Amino acid sequence: MNTDSFRLGRNLYGRLVLSLGERLYEGVVPVRSFPISAPNEGIALVGADGAELVWIDSLAALPPDTRHLLQDELASREFMPEIHHIRQVSSFATPSRWQVETDKGDTVLLLKAEEDIRRLSGGRLLIADAHGVQFLIRDMAALDKTSRRLLDHFL
């Protein structure tokens, strides 16, 4: 859809409002189609009823104010810490506690089973901890030697 054919703003309660011509849609939610492999491409604006209202091919194609509004909304809804360093694991058998450094700070995650580590394309890993938090390793090869050695025991 042409990015000039819609406007996006917030109402008094901070919820997104989409203007499509004469129609207003309140409570619009942005949804990424490919949150890991292409986070800035393929964004749908979905109405309160779950119907897709607008498809955005690329965030880069949007005017800066609309792009920043969408990025802020997506950041407030999504929480996927990216692991930069694995400091220690309690055991090489599961369940095990991992002390990790993420882009959100240091934390401890509980790995229930080795199946909770999913391999993705491009050397990426998605790790689900016992509390339902998804942790991302964007590039296994870019991890330091200690982190890779600890991770190898589970792959």
Image (cartoon, rainbow, N blue to C red):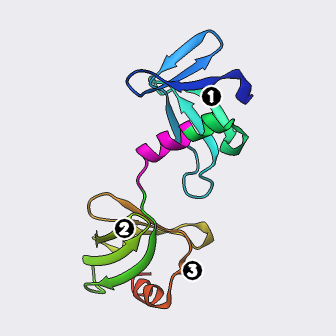
* Tag 1: amino acid: Val
Q: Position of residue 114 (x, y in %)?
A: 36, 75
Residue 49: tell me if it is visible.
Answer: yes
**Residue 127 vs residue 86, the one in the foreground:** 86
For mark 2, what is the residue?
A: 105
Mark 3 and mark 1 residues within 8 Å of each other at the beta carbon: no
Q: Nearer the viewer, mark 3 or mark 2?
A: 2
For badge 3, the amino acid type reads Ala
Instruction: Specify the quadrant that holds the C terminus.
Output: bottom left
**Sooner in the amino-acid sequence: mark 3 or mark 1:** 1
Q: Note whether 141 is above or below 133 in the view shown.
A: below
46 with respect to 13 (left or right): right
Residue at 69 percent of width and 37 percent of height: 62
Q: Secondary structure at mark 3?
A: helix
Name the N-terminal-most of marks 1 and 2: 1
Q: Residue at x 55, y 38 (%)?
A: 70
| Residue type pointed to by label 2 | Gly
Is label 2 in a helix, a strand or a loop? Answer: strand
Q: Which residue is mark 3?
A: 142
* Mark 1: secondary structure: strand
Q: Which mark is residue 54?
A: 1
Callout 1–callout 2 Cβ contact below 8 Å? no
Chief secondary structure of the magenta portion: helix
| Callout 2 crowding tier (Cα within 10 Å): few <14, some 14–19, many ≥20 | few
Of discs 3 and 1, which sits in the foreground? 3
Query: Magenta residues, as a range?
Result: 69-79
- Rendering coords of residue 88 (x, y %): 32, 85
Between disc 1 and disc 2, the foreground one is 2
Q: Position of residue 19 (x, y in %)?
A: 59, 18
Q: CA distance from mark 3 to mark 1?
A: 36 Å
